[in-house]
Amino acid sequence: MSPLEAAYAVLRQNPLWRQMFELNPAIQLIIDPVSRVVIDANPAACRFYRYRREEFKSLLFDHIEVNALPEGDLGSESMTFSFQHRIRGGELRDVKVNASAYDFDGETLTHMILVDITKRRRAEAAEQDQRALSAALATTTAALNSSLDLHEVLDRILEQVQHLIPCDFINIMLIENDYAAVVRSRGYEQTVNIEEYLGVKLNIHSTPTLRWMIENNRSLLIADIATDPRWRQLHTTEDWLKSYLGIPIRMGSHVIGFLNLDGSAPMAAVDYDERVLQAFADQAGVAIRNARLYERVQRQAMLMEQRVAERTAELEYERRQLRAILDSMTEGVIYSEPDSNGLLQPRYLNRAMARLLGQEHQEDLYSLIARIDALAIEGSDQPSVRSVISAALDQQPVVSMQLSLVGPDGARVEASLTTTRVDSLSGELLGAVTVVRDISREIALERQRSRFVAQASHELRTPLANMKTRLYLLRRQPERIDTHLPVLEKATSHMWRLVENLLDISRLERGAVRLDLEQLEVQEVVAFVVEAHRPAVEIKGQRLHVDLPDEPLVLIADGDRLIQVLNNLVANASAYTPAGGIITVRALRVPEMDAGESPPAGVRIDVIDTGIGIPPDRREEIFQPFYRIADDNDGSGLGLSITREIIHLHGGTIQVGGMPEGGSCFTLWLPLRQDAAGGADAPR
Ligand code: ADP
């Protein structure tokens, strides 16, 4: 027993020591600071180091102390240090050691109280690890999420993964419909055909590596592909490939793809931190999902944009179509919308409306709108155009009015105005459409019609009254039948002619007369008419001249109608020429004579008399039905209007002029070829 051990044996006898060392649960060791031999260990120390008390006695402190303390340090007065101790079996524990030096009769021993801080240390280390991992992941996550472009995100994944694990060959696969396709790769340029490689698609159910990762929901390390049955060779050229590490890219619990790290050397699990790589792959999953969502939103936005563009083009087309329709209308259209005060203001006028306002184009909307007010007839108490537009503000859906307006040339225009409300589905007033129709012609025609009826009735009344009187007289004086009968006959035939003429003119005006066209020679027709009239003309003491060319004038015309026209003109010439006068009928081919202004080749027939003539201001009116300059014969005033209708139906013209020596000249022009003038159906 060494002197130190002897001194310690004395100490052990002390009951207080027993209390403090033997029974105390704190781990305690007694060491010889010089020989570094463990002199004693308390039961707590035996439990901790897993040595029996006797076994300790042959142990050197250095056997349990991992980081050997420098010589002499154990002899110091008192110190606290943390180190790692090796317990039985080699396991290392973190301990906090409090060592105190005691002196016994010149001998020094070291008393150590140890606290096992392994758990605390591990927790601390884990926390530190976690913190470092979080920091690393935060950086990579930020890098991944800094783009929403899928291609860029994939590039960044490749870039960032290399910060976490050095690798020469890396690719990303994304799953779509049971197939994982390589979408990005790095490092393969020298080893494979990259075009082909990027097209590689693997069935996730039949590819063992991929299926393993999906089923186990974690990364797969194939340290040596030569020996692992899960490896399936894809290319025979892959002899450079030695190891494989696959990490599933997950979205929650769902695997959406894989990070594949191919190694040209065998790899070991200690070469990387699986948790870090998986956490990174999960972040990559989020970034890919975000990019895909963004892509979808972008696609949607583009689609929307395209739809909007298409719809706009459609609307523009419809707008143009509507405008073309409105501008081709003969009626004027004003579209008005309510202003901020709720008053209807014109916003659009079509071309016909612009014309009605005296302009060819409707571009200068404002000056045109200003003119709308000027349409009203000054001083009249009739409603204005604006008041007809504003009528839409009342609840009636359609308002119609007839107004007299002042046209652009100052002439009076009779117009019918109809304003229609344009309502929204909820019944709110959106605008009003006002259609302005020039009905001047309709009104004139209506007036003409009623005048015609009045005149016709008047013309019929005279012979009827005559007949009535004669019938009355005949009843009272039956013996004077020979006096009354001729008058009755004359009145009857006059009425007959009148009614025939009335029917004729109405049929002609309605367009109900069809010409019976034939080829005829003008000379023959003229000769026929002249010879028919000659006896009566000569009885009146007039002379009848005919002036016809030798060359036959051939026409396509209705012979009976042409005879009707010439009969009427010759009869009139005779009727309005005193005895001794001359009536001439002349025919010639034009344009030989009147080249230049005259219409295309045709036949001109003049009926000239030396009679009373027609004042220039009546020359247009005599062609109106019932118009007669004087009432001094029994003419009906219908002959010339029938004549004009027939000539127009042939595509020809009729004019009347005066002769220098007095008398009248009626000039007909008829086209040689019917088609040149539109033929029998030509518009009149
Ligand atoms: P009417 O049966 O009265 O002759 P028309 O329509 O043939 O009817 O002629 C209309 C009017 O034109 C006649 O009433 C007459 O006043 C005038 N008129 C027609 N032909 C001549 C003529 N050759 N000379 C003078 N006046 C004419």
Image: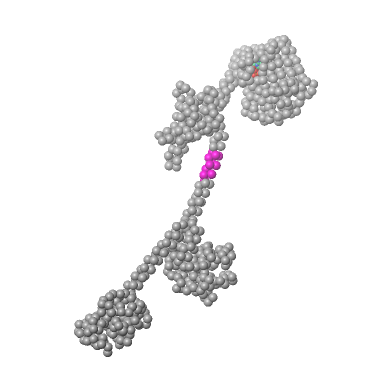
Q: Nearer the viewer, residue 368 or 582?
A: 368
For this orientation, the residue located farthest to the left is 15
**Residue sitting at 45 percent across and 27 percent down?**
383
- Residue 9 x, y percent position in the rendering: 24, 87
Q: Nearer the viewer, residue 53 or 442?
A: 53
- Residue 431 x, y percent position in the rendering: 46, 36
Where ligand 1 lies, by image quadrant? top right
Vertical position of residue 461 compared to residue 33: above or below: above
- Residue 19 x, y percent position in the rendering: 21, 82
Q: In this orientation, does residue 214 appear? A: no
For this orientation, the residue located farthest to the right is 550
Quarter of the view holding residue 90: bottom left
Provide the major secondary structure of the magenta segment: helix
Quadrant, the C terminus: top right
For this orientation, the residue located farthest to the bottom is 1
Q: What stretch is highlighted in magenta?
A: 311-322
